[in-house]
């Protein structure tokens, strides 16, 4: 039933709404009476028919199922699995690619204003491929009841079967992969290296392809396990490595901490820059990643690998001149920030995949005497609401 009354909303209700600004999370803010509604598949200033999909005590969620007055930034989604009730893997297929970056810029600014009390401006930089398709080298497919690979619908356990994913690299577009009926409900983890190698794993075990993938980033070579963390966008490793290492501005003889260092993407150039008189401390909690790093850097006498949690290992390192951290989506948090500032590094470079946690940690660093003097966003997750940021904090 279509309604515009201010009565309590129920799942299935339909409302005609004018959509407001973008919010962190891939949705847009609208209001009905005094109630906030987070709307997917919409754009700011559009007039849309919204179907309510969930209701809580604080807010409701809904999908724009009909566009009554469209934004000039709206485009036809390139993927036929994108839309209300369909695949939840992408948030912005219906948005012009340049405007996607404007939306992400607005989200980062809002998060810093609200959570860090810092007013700032920044660029969100696009990288190749500029159309936002065929970039993802790591995919995790769920299994439908029919044993077919798919992706979850938004905020749901329902698996939407697909026959291709337009944001995945084209090497994954194999009909036999999607058409096969797989036994069991183990997820399919697919990884494609920069050299074109493809591994398929289930339940953490390799079932096809090489058990070690070879990645080349700038002049550096890496050999990693398919299930070890690696940046998903095919151009992310080179993009982030260049910006982060440039911002660190390491000196010969420096002692530098590579926190949440994974397999050592940033470690290789750090070792070159600190020279024989310097030292790199790689701290990582993933056993698989530290095994990969130990093999790759076995001959490096100026590298110390610390397997374990950052908040436990960082206080044990006596000297640190510079820090680079690339934490998970939850950010570093109070304990790690305290441990970092206690070492008094001259510079901290922070690579973040979540602007909310970055903003919270930025407030902690500012309060501890570190000033944010550089922030840039990279659109390394096009068609989705995610954005990668690189920030630099300097002491004093």
Image (cartoon, rainbow, N blue to C red):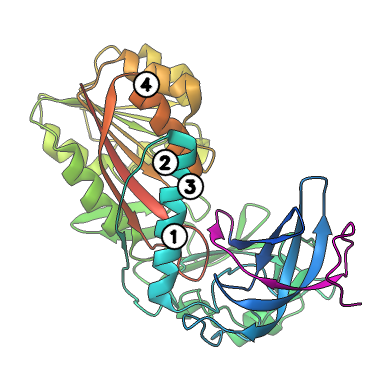
Q: Are marks 2 and 4 in contact (CB under 8 Å)?
A: no
| Secondary structure found at label 1 | helix
Q: For this view, does 63 lie left or right of residue 242?
A: right
Q: Is residue 275 left or right of residue 198?
A: left
Q: Secondary structure at mark 3?
A: loop
Is residue 165 left or right of 187 when viewed as pictured?
A: left
Q: Disc number at residue 367?
A: 4
Q: Nearer the viewer, mark 4 or mark 3?
A: 4
Give the CA separation, mark 2 to mark 1. 26 Å
- Which tag, 2 or 3, sits closer to the chain's start? 2
Q: CA distance from mark 4 to mark 1?
A: 26 Å
Dot label at residue 104? 1
Task: Residue at 81% x, 66% y: name it.
Answer: 52
Name the element at disc 2: loop
Residue 279's image quarter? top left
Cβ–Cβ below 8 Å for labels 4 and 3? no
Q: Which residue is mark 3?
A: 354
């Amino acid at each position: 039933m279509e309604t515009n009354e201010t009565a309590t909303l129920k799942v299935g209700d339909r409302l005609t709404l004018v959509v407001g600004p973008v919010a962190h999370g891939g949705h847009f803010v609208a209001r009905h009476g005094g109630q906030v509604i987070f709307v997917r598949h919409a754009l700011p200033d559009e007039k849309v028919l919204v179907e309510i999909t969930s209701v809580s005590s604080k807010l409701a969620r809904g999908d724009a199922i009909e566009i009554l007055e469209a934004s000039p930034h709206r485009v036809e989604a390139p993927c036929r699995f994108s839309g209300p009730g369909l695949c939840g893997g992408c948030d912005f297929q219906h948005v012009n690619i340049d405007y996607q970056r404007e939306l992400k810029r607005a989200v980062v600014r809002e998060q810093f204003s609200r959570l860090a009390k810092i007013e700032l401006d920044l660029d969100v930089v696009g990288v190749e491929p500029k159309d936002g398709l065929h970039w993802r080298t790591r995919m995790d497919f769920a299994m439908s009841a029919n044993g077919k690979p798919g992706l979850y619908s938004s905020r749901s356990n329902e698996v939407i079967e697909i026959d291709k994913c337009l944001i995945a690299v084209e090497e994954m577009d194999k009909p036999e992969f999607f058409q096969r009926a797989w036994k069991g409900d183990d997820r399919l983890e697919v990884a494609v290296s920069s050299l074109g190698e493809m591994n398929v794993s289930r339940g953490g075990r390799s079932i096809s392809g090489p058990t070690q993938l070879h990645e080349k980033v700038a002049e550096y070579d890496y050999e990693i396990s398919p299930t070890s963390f690696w940046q998903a966008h095919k151009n992310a490793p080179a993009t982030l490595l260049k910006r982060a290492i440039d911002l660190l501005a390491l000196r010969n003889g420096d002692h530098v901490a590579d926190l949440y260092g994974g397999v050592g993407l940033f470690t290789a150039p750090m070792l070159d820059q600190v020279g024989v008189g310097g030292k790199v401390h790689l701290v990582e909690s993933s056993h698989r990643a530290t095994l990969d790093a130990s093999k790759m850097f076995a001959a490096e006498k100026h590298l110390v690998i610390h397997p374990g949690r950052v908040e436990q290992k960082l206080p044990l390192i006596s000297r640190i001149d510079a820090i680079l951290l690339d934490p998970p989506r939850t950010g570093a948090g109070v304990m790690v920030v305290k441990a970092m500032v206690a070492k008094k590094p001259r510079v901290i470079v922070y690579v973040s995949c979540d602007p909310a946690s970055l903003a919270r940690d930025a407030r902690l660093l500012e309060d501890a005497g570190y000033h944010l003097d550089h922030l840039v966003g990279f659109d390394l997750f096009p068609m989705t609401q995610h954005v990668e940021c690189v920030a630099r904090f300097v002491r004093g």
